[in-house]
Image (spheres, rainbow, N blue to C red):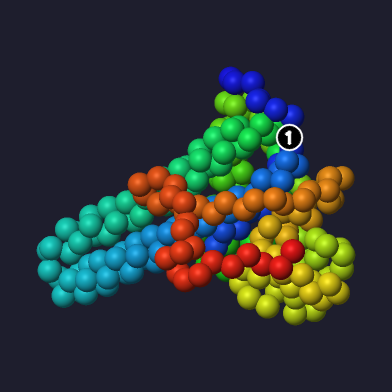
Amino acid sequence: QREPKGSETAFIDMGLNNLFAVVTTAGDAVIVKGDVIKAEYFRGKGEARTLQSVRDTLRKLDVATWREYHYKYLKSVFKTHERLRHLYRTAVRFLAEWLYERGVKRVYMGYPYMITQDNGSEYNTNIWWYRKLALWLHDTLQEYGIELLLTPEFKTSVECSICHVEHNGARVHRGLYVCGKTGRKLNADLNAANNIAHRAGYRVAVKKIESYKVTHNGVKPVTPSRRGVARDPSI
């Protein structure tokens, strides 16, 4: 077990489109995107559905080769599960190393209690492994001597981290939150991470935002220049 390099505190908002949105008391921020995970899940789902359909058709026609397609179907389901697990574990290891290099000693992470019971869907039940993510991150952070504390994230996504008021229609886009009082723009998931920091009794001023995407070949930095001219939101 390592010793932390500093005494900073970090705050994490978990999600699916953005697996982790993190801010630290030193002003660092990082977003780890999870769009590849969604693509991998739906690719595997389509493959398994096709094999299952062929298997059932051959079985109804009493063709002996249906057993071969049943084996392919089981193999496809297992392969998709393992590929998803690899993506999640890669993201967890990257985040642990990122926090360690920035001198973080304690982490507060928002946990979506009862989300599947209150608002269950395919996304937060089948694709998003939030409980496993929390357990894996806890075990991995222990290797770096970092403490992980879970806290309820109820309404952290709809509350404004600037004036701490719930504005109607403030989330104008999937990743954009606009304060209805000041008109300032900020990333919606980083806004939730800032609210977690506020509930824990901290005040964070973000100085630099890094963005990464988890892939099967590791975590890659996102280069906004490929999508056009990058612009900083109003601060």
Q: In which quadrant of the rendered image does the N terminus lie? A: top right
Please say whether residue 230 is visible from this viewpoint. yes
Q: Look at the numbered disc 1 and give the secondary structure of its residue.
A: strand
Q: From this viewpoint, which residue is outermost toward the left?
A: 64
> Local crowd at mark 1 within 10 Å, few (<14), some, or many (≥20)?
some
Q: Estimate the x, y position of residue 100 in percent, counting from the top left.
A: 60, 32
Asked if residue 126 shows in the view, the reply is no
Q: Which residue is mark 1?
A: 8
x then y, percent, for residue 160: 80, 65
The residue depicted at 52 percent of the width and 57 percent of the height is 33
Question: Which residue is at a point 34% across and 62% down the rendered structure image?
Answer: 44
Q: Amino acid at mark 1?
A: Glu
Which residue corresponds to the image point at 32% horizontal and 51% vertical from the top-left?
Answer: 79
117 horizontally vs 72: left or right: right
Q: Looking at the picture, how far across and down is residue 27, in whole percent?
A: 72, 46
Q: Report the front residue among 136 and 216.
A: 216
80 lies left or right of 224: left
User: Closest to the observer: 16 or 63?
Assistant: 16
